[in-house]
Amino acid sequence: MKPSFAKSNRSMIALWIILIITFIFTGIVDSYFFSIASIGITLQLAAPLGLLAAAQTIVMLTGGIDLSLAMIATGAAYIVSVKSNAGLTTALLFALVFCVLVGAINGISIGLFGVNPLIMTLSMGAILIGVFTVGVSTFLRGSSRMPEVLVTLSSGLIFDPITWPLLVWVIVGGFVHFSLTRTGFGRVIYAIGDNAQAARLAGVKVWQVQVAAYVSCAILGGFAGIMLGGQSGAVAISLANSYLLPSVAAVVIGGTSIMGGLGSYSGSVMGALILSVLSYLLAILNSSEAFKQLVYGGIVLALAWVYSSISERK
Amino acid sequence: MRIPLREQTWNISILGLVVGLTLWRGNQLPVFGSYEIKTILLGIIPIALLAMGQSLIIIGGGINLAIGAEAILINCITARFSEGTSFSTSLKWALIGILIAALIGAATGWVISKSGIADIVVTLATSFVLIGLALFVQPGPGGGVNLEFAQAFSGKGDSFVAPLLVLFLPILFIWLPLQRSRIGISLYAIGSSKDAAFLSGVNVARARILLYTFGGVFAGICGVSLTAITQAASPFAVISNTATLNSVAAAVLGGVSLAGGVGGLFGPALASLVLYYIPTIMLGYGIDPAYSQIIQGALTILVVLVGGLLRSRGK
């Protein structure tokens, strides 16, 4: 069930306050942060995380989780870059087939055979790492450079501070938000996450919804991966690895329950924005890797705690 | 506590698999003597100890995605402060390390029961914090330990008695007494159903803190064993992530149900042998180790799938 208006409203206000505090704090530490250009860059870097968070939101609303998401994203980007000399459409088609295939395997195993989502996707991640490590030197040998069009779409500027990736994020994210809130698909996603048994008795084919959820998740992951590849110019096997925890964290901070059935994509967007400002802050503090990891983990935990205590209070 | 028949069948089939793989591996090696047994034991000790800690936590209805990071942190602490010291100092730091791991476990359990945030989220975040701490203690590979202390763990010469003890002493002195105690039963109880356990008078919050504390002790022993075996520290997130993944895989292979409340620690200890053999045997054939990751992932999925089907048929 979606939270009542007053409750979800209060949670959104809390998220806005957290975002504004991190935003202002970052601006105080680094005055350049308030410039139009740097806001544009922050939003541009937030876009792939926002797409990954959309993917994670969909499966987490069904009560699942996708820990293979980072490897799906990397895989899609890899396929696009290697197949790009056969034409952009072909390359994108290959990537789409890959995403649908992996998403369907995840969804069928979880929905139809009852494999625990955590184990399924963790193992799928390991399998994909293996497949691509082998593939790099065999069936996926070739250029790791992204096609120019995709580089522009991933990092090109339209006018300050609006970039192409931001526009892509707004369109795709808007579509996800619309699907979750205004369509039958969204309704059954919330329904099976809230109570799969009840949804089944009400005539919902639960496994089909789960397959659809994991496939959509994988496709969104593919989008994010291609965007990340475009932003870095070339694709490496570790491309999206560091985005796995943030994708889960953004969703959790945004108030979506890991048990399913509760939450919204707008919350995840706020989570993604907060985390992006935070990583900007940690980058400009020029701190050691140790400090960054420590602070990042600590803040994710603290935000999740603050959020859950705010939204639990009746 | 009697072990149910289905669990025994599971353990026996895993045992069969282990025996088969051992013969296969033995066939690859020119000689299979006590030195080879020692090598195998040293290879599985870290995986097995971590798998036992993870299994304990999963049995109690939780999951710890930071368990690999806990072990790496203890590895870094003990290796940094034991370098070039006497036997007793190394031993002292090993004990301090295990104590720290227990405290980290207790803190994790406390945060989870106090905040009401899901185990996955809390432990995913703590894994970052712990790797950060490990990098503070030991910014790069390095460190060391007293040689006699290392030998006390890994055995002198060809003798495999010491590693065998390292593997079985935690089971004998931690798991068996725990399983038979009130605390152990309360861990199984909160794993099966927190509500039912609460209504039967179990202090759920305390039981969960203890759960993660014991998991931390195993992770701590794992960290010390890493220091003793490798005589160095390696503060890398990749290693801790792989270790965590392996610990979950071994727990699942060893018959621990992710739903909680089912399983023991012998199964996962045996299953860690399977996880050790797959890449080792493949390397023996000169196959790219990346394939072993594919096989291991597929095997884990298959085991969970078959286990789930058997369980639903048994109902």
Image (cartoon, rainbow, N blue to C red):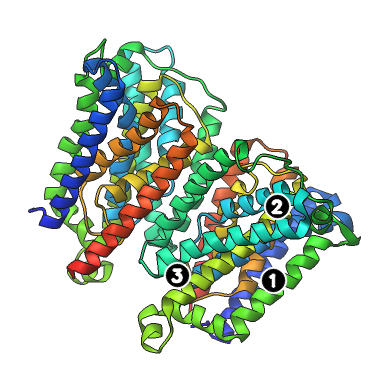
Q: Would residue B67 be seen by someone viewing this image from the given angle?
A: no
Instruction: Provide the secondary structure element on which disc 1 rests.
Output: helix
Q: In which quadrant is the C terminus of chain B drawn?
A: bottom left
Q: Quadrant of residue A235?
A: top right
- The one nearer the camera, B59 or A65, is A65
Instruction: Provide the secondary structure element on which disc 3 rests.
Output: loop
- Residue drawn where x is 20% and y is 62% of the image: B189
Specify the amino acid type for callout 3.
Gly
Instruction: Provide the secondary structure element on which disc 2 rests.
Output: helix
Find disc 3 in the rendering and name its residue.
A63
* B151 in relation to B290, above or below: above
* B67 in relation to A159, above or below: above
Q: Residues within 10 Å of mark 2 (few under 14, many from 20)?
A: many
- Residue drawn where x is 63% and y is 64% of the image: A220
Find disc 1 in the rendering and name its residue.
A173
Q: Chain of mark 3?
A: A
Q: Of label 3 and label 1, which has the lower sequence position?
A: 3
Tell me, for residue A80, which label it has, or none. Answer: 2
* B215 in relation to B204, above or below: above
Q: Are marks 3 and 2 in contact (CB under 8 Å)?
A: no
Mark 3 to mark 2 CA distance (whole Å)? 31 Å
Mark 1 to mark 2 CA distance (whole Å)? 22 Å
Specify the amino acid type for callout 2.
Val
Q: Of label 1 and label 2, which has the lower sequence position?
A: 2
Percent x, y of residue A64:
46, 66
